[in-house]
Image (cartoon, helix red, strand yellow):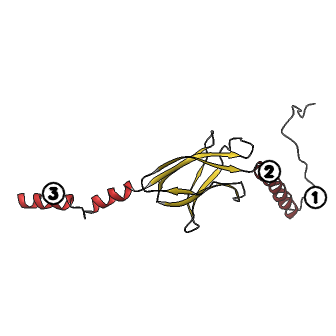
Amino acid sequence: MRLLALLLILVLASPASPLVLTSAAQAELASVGGTATSSTGETLINATVQLRDLATGTVTSTTTSSSTGAFGFAAVNPGNYVVEVLNAAGQVVGTSASISVAAGAAITGVTVTATAAAVAATAAAASTATIVAVTSAAAAAGVAGIAAASGQGDASPSR
């Protein structure tokens, strides 16, 4: 029994042990964080932000910016990356400078800036797409006319 316990201790303490290898691999991962803003300096709230590996061209992680424009990516492998901000249609509207990530590094202060025109155009395009979809659905259903009302104002049906 003592021999079995001793062998178990030796196997678990061995550098080739799967438990030791997992810990070492996890220690090599890094993190990347920063802020998403428009070209006019406005904070981009709830913007989709993604991390792209420059060696493979693939998106390795996606997140959403906070109410202060902050974003973060954890468990990042060493390599070269860019951070991209997307519009509502999923198109890249801003890209950071290249970021070199070393094993175990905590990269902070990354800024990704989207052009104000691209952000504004996205909002307008999303509204137009909704109108086109509603109009198309109405036409398909045989509706000849659509009345649209703004939810802004204080008019009531009794007036």
Residue reaching furthest to the left: 2
In the rendered image, residue 83, in percent from the top left (x then y), is placed at 60, 55
Q: Residues within 10 Å of mark 1 (few under 14, many from 20)?
A: few
- Which circle, 3 or 1, is nearer the viewer? 3
Q: Can you tell which quarter of the image residue 109 is in?
A: top right
Quarter holding the C terminus is top right
In the rendered image, residue 124, in percent from the top left (x then y), is placed at 81, 51
- Give the secondary structure at mark 2: helix
Q: Give the side of residue 138 with respect to residue 86, left or right.
A: right
Please state which amino acid type lies under the numbered disc 3: Ile
Q: Which residue is mark 3?
A: 9
Asked if disc 1 and disc 2 are in contact, CB closer than 8 Å, the reply is no
Which mark identifies residue 117? 2
Where is 70 relative to 18, above or below?
A: above
Q: Residues within 10 Å of mark 3 (few under 14, many from 20)?
A: few
Q: Which residue is mark 1?
A: 144
- Which circle, 2 or 3, is nearer the viewer? 2
Q: How far separated are the C-alphas under marks 1 and 2?
A: 35 Å
Which comes sooner in the sequence, label 1 or label 2? 2
Which comes sooner in the sequence, label 2 or label 3? 3
